[in-house]
Image (cartoon, rainbow, N blue to C red):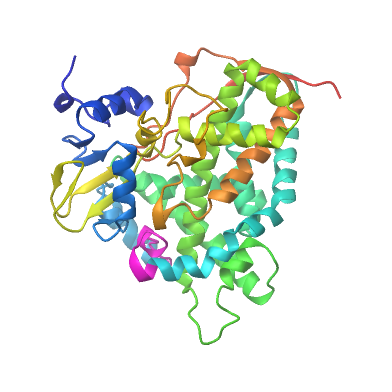
Amino acid sequence: MKSLAEMTIVDPENIKDPYDYYERLRNEDPVHFDEKLGAWLVTKHKDIIEAARNTTVFSDEMRVAASVRSPYQDEANEYIKSKGFYLLDPSDSFKVDGDLHKRRRGLVAHAFTAQAVEAMADRVAELCQAQFSSFSKDGVVDLVKEYAIPVPIKVICDALGLPLDRIEDVRRAADSMVARAGSGATRDEAYQHADNIMMLQQFARDAIEQRRTAPTNDLISQVVNSGADNPEGEQLTEQELMSIISVSIAGGVDTTRNTIAYALYTLATRPELLQRLQQAENQDKEISALCEETLRYYAPVPALPRVVLEDTELGGKKIPKDSLVFLCWASGNRDPERFENPNEFNIDRKGSTQHLSFGVGVHICLGAMLARNEVKAALRQFINAVESVELAQPVSDLDYSDSLVILRGLKSLPVQLKMKAN
């Protein structure tokens, strides 16, 4: 058996399935320095929460430049600026701490309240139904391509006033927002990412201008006009608006599609669970339980980074100032000190909502309620329309994304569908 010093989270096998590695870390070295990644991995639930809540030491403000990135990124950045667009670093939105984070979040929080999300529920259900109808027939279908990807893109585009007839362009832009933080992009790819990001910014600019002149009750209007009723109060700058809209797309699309895909995979591999949900007296409660257990068991964002602002200690380890630390949500979600039988998928689990998949503390995901609503609406439509579903290829052949450690999702999910008779 390899020693932990010989192992790394960025090994292709660990990217595909990190849970054995996380278990070893929790048991042997819960706050571990991964030499190849050049960062600390925090893997126990209690240590993750401690670090996430201590924003004065573990800062969420980390620019793309501070992480691995393409050697052509500076060149691509100059190209973006020359065209009159923003670079939209994550620190232009919510990847900041202290008063600046409080100000930005406070200005837009009302747009993501339970009441605001509930007002969108019928529209979200309508979009799910329309997308499902586009492929709802007996036969083999890729549920990632045909359902898990389009649903969150359409929902966020609709909510933000972006063109629904350009969802493929928006999807590419969302992928580029994530991919530009990677180190493997060629010069051509770096420029393509730049073009995609500028296209997204133009969509956002058009939507912002429309809502400023003709506001409605939708999400984009609430974000754009935040603070407008208080002329003496602060409002978001255009750069902040553009960044928040872009981050909402990049963050909301990938994580939600991964959760939908994992839940559908669960139904395709557990026919008894699908039957239970179809026959449930309180179906909404059961679907909510499936959603939460999916988020716990298959964390769509396995880990997110923090930067250490001063020499500190965590879990008995001394961590130097300026270190990069990854809070491993996926590992915390499988910590036996917090969850009984954590490697068992169980929708009857008590306390499953205490998972870390939306983060914790002041940086908890602002769009968590909207994401939950999307996932449940997509599952409700699927569960009530199909008679049966099973994988169309072996589990071992399923392909997973390879986006370092911050995203983990199925690239495809081919299944054999049998629809209910009309």
Which residue does the image show at 55% across and 67% down from the upper left?
Answer: 205
Which residue does the image show at 54% across and 41% down from the upper left?
Answer: 256
- Of all residues, the one furthest to the right in this rendering is 422
Which residue does the image show at 49% across and 29% down from the upper left?
Answer: 411
- The spot of residue 104 in percent (x, y) is 45, 68
Above or below residue 395? Residue 407 is below
Q: Kindly tell me whether residue 254 is visible in this rendering.
A: yes
Indicate the quadrant containing the N terminus: top left, top right, bottom left or bottom right: top left
Q: Is residue 245 left or right of residue 219?
A: left
Q: Quadrant of residue 126?
A: top right
- The spot of residue 369 in percent (x, y) is 58, 50
Residue 89 on the magenta span: yes
Q: Main secondary structure of the magenta part?
A: loop
- The spot of residue 391 in percent (x, y) is 58, 16
Q: Is residue 130 left or right of residue 85?
A: right
Residue 168 on the magenta span: no
User: Magenta residues?
Assistant: 83-100
